[in-house]
């Protein structure tokens, strides 16, 4: 078999895993550089470093504004689907994350169907750490635009549009707000003066930072991170690889004998009941 044919037979899951391995290796190298730099800074300028650390600690962790309908501690989570669905799918993604893009292009249709059927209640954590490693503003601006779309009741549709049109990881196209506003035109009813002002004014910049701080404190270090009822299922659930068919099977097994939820239009729901919120599926703190 030629190399070209062999490449053509690689599955989307294999590409996700390879991309995630690259991201994790990059993260480890970055952490080593950060640690080395921090040690040198302490030796050269201990007093100045102490001021920087204190300033970091004093930053507010509660955003002054959060998108409408967000849930959880400090309203950091975007809910999609029926709040009374029997299962909760928790997803951590970065708008610039290529592995997230591969995951979404393979699984978004299945997840949307599960939400619309009242089988799952998705809790989305929109993180933005890739800007730190590759520079730029695409992760943060994309996350803020998703918060603006949540205000307008179009989070899911705009989320799907962003991942279908995701640029290469090193291309900071989402750092250009005009690109995000142009993509919003693909979502019926989203391109409004209110949405454009929200994006251009970076209305939820503090919220975006707080979501990332929450991710930094969690035990999860890469994206996509996907959990079903608190149990990690990406890239595997036990011995089984994640596939669209397996995801449906796992959800149906978890929901057996339980009543389905009632989803709102287009995957959007009003504020959830307390029983179905992430109070029952909190972000784990780093040990």
Image: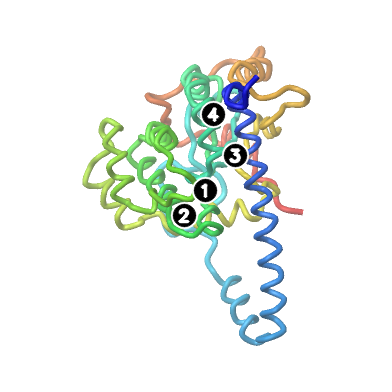
Image coloring type:
rainbow
Q: What element carries label 4?
A: strand
N-terminal-most mark, 2 or 3: 2
| In the image, farthest residue toward the front | 2
Q: In the displayed structure, does residue 226 sit left or right of residue 118?
A: right
Between the C-alphas of marks 4 and 1, the distance is: 16 Å
Q: In the displayed structure, does residue 228 sit left or right of residue 67?
A: right
Between the C-alphas of marks 2 and 4, the distance is: 22 Å
**Location of the N terminus (image quadrant):** top right
Q: In which quarter of the image is residue 202?
A: bottom left
Which residue carries the number 3 mark? Answer: 224
Crowding at label 4, few (<14), some or many (≥20) Cα neighbours within 10 Å? Answer: many
Q: Do the residues labelled 4 and 3 touch (CB within 8 Å)?
A: no
Q: Are marks 1 and 2 in contact (CB under 8 Å)?
A: yes
Q: Relative to 143, is 81 above or below?
A: above
Q: Relative to 91, is 197 above or below?
A: below
In the rendering, which numbered label is found on residue 207?
2
Which residue carries the number 4 mark? Answer: 121
Q: Are marks 4 and 1 in contact (CB under 8 Å)?
A: no
In the rendering, which numbered label is found on residue 137?
none
Q: Residue at x 53, y 25 (%)?
A: 106
Between the C-alphas of marks 2 and 3, the distance is: 20 Å
Q: In the displayed structure, does residue 238 sit left or right of residue 277?
A: right
Q: Relative to 184, is 174 above or below?
A: below
Q: Which residue is drawn at 70% across and 24% down?
A: 241
Q: Residue at x 48, y 19 (%)?
A: 113
Q: Position of residue 150 (x, y in %)?
A: 39, 40
In the rendering, which numbered label is found on residue 76?
1
Between the C-alphas of marks 1 and 2, the distance is: 7 Å
N-terminal-most mark, 2 or 4: 4
Q: Position of residue 201 (x, y in %)?
A: 31, 58
N-terminal-most mark, 4 or 1: 1
């Amino acid at each position: 078999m030629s190399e070209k044919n062999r490449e053509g037979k690689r599955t989307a899951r294999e590409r996700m895993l390879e991309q995630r391995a690259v991201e994790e290796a990059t993260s480890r190298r970055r952490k080593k550089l950060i640690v080395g730099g921090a040690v040198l800074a302490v030796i050269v300028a201990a007093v100045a470093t102490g001021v920087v650390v204190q300033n970091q600690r004093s930053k507010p962790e509660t955003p002054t504004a959060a998108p409408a309908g967000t849930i959880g501690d400090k309203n950091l989570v975007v809910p999609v689907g029926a709040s009374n669905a029997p299962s909760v799918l928790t997803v951590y993604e970065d708008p610039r994350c290529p592995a997230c893009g591969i995951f979404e292009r393979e699984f978004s249709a299945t997840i949307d169907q599960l939400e619309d059927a009242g089988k799952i209640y998705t809790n989305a954590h929109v993180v933005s750490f890739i800007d730190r490693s590759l520079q730029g503003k695409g992760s943060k601006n994309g996350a803020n635009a998703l918060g603006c779309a949540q205000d307008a009741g179009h989070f899911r549709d705009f989320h799907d549009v962003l991942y279908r049109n995701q640029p290469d990881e090193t291309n900071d196209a989402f750092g250009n707000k005009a690109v995000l506003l142009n993509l919003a035109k693909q979502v019926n009813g989203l391109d409004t003066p209110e949405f454009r002002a929200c994006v251009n004014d970076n209305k939820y910049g503090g919220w975006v930072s707080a979501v990332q701080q929450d991710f930094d404190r969690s035990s999860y270090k890469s994206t996509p991170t996907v959990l079903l009822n608190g149990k990690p299922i990406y890239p595997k659930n036990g011995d089984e690889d994640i596939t669209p068919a397996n995801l449906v099977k796992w959800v149906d097994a978890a929901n057996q004998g339980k009543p389905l939820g009632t989803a709102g239009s287009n995957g959007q729901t009003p504020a959830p009941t307390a029983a179905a919120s992430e109070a029952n599926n909190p972000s784990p703190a780093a040990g």
